[in-house]
Image (spheres, helix red, strand yellow):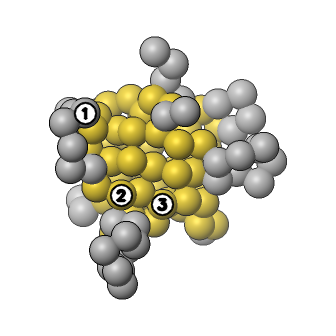
Amino acid sequence: MMTIGYFRRDGDGFTGKLDTFASDALITLTPAEKFSSKAPDFIAWSGERECGAGWRVNDTSGAVLSLKIDDPTGQRPDHGRRGRGAAVRLVPAR
């Protein structure tokens, strides 16, 4: 299975790296203010730029987060899921 990044819990958020053919970026996920049940739980940042969002997952897949990271140089946003563990890989969801 292809790995496009690794993330680690950092306080009440996550830090990690997205590494694809088009991107090589350090990503920080910070808690988001929930304004509806479908709003993201985390905002993704690359430096000071917002670049995506993350949602907590409550299903049987074993994933903890579902992420959507948007790179303007790419054709479409990268989607991925982060599994359980201390430092876990982000695998693409197609």
Which residue is drawn at the image coordinates 37% and 70% (left, top)?
Answer: 38
Q: Is residue 56 above or below residue 40?
A: above
CA–CA distance in space, label 2 to label 1: 14 Å
Q: Measuring from the top left, give residue 48's x and y in whole percent.
A: 60, 68
**Residue 51 percent coordinates (x, y):** 60, 60
SS for callout 1: loop
Left/right of residue 71 with respect to residue 11 in the rendered view = right
Residue at the spot 64% in from the left edge and 48% down from the top edge: 77
Q: Is residue 59 left or right of residue 42?
A: left
| Mark number, residue 17 | none
The residue type indicated by label 3 comes to Ala
Residue identifier under label 3: 53
Rate crowding at label 1 as few (under 14), some (14 to 19) or many (20 or more) other CA atoms within 10 Å: few
Residue at 45 percent of width and 29 percent of height: 91
**Residue tagged 1:** 61
Residue ID at (27%, 50%): 57
- Amino acid on which disc 1 is placed: Ser
The tag earlier along the polypeptide, 2 or 1, is 2
Give whichever of 16, 76 is nearer the camera: 76
Q: Which residue is mark 2?
A: 55
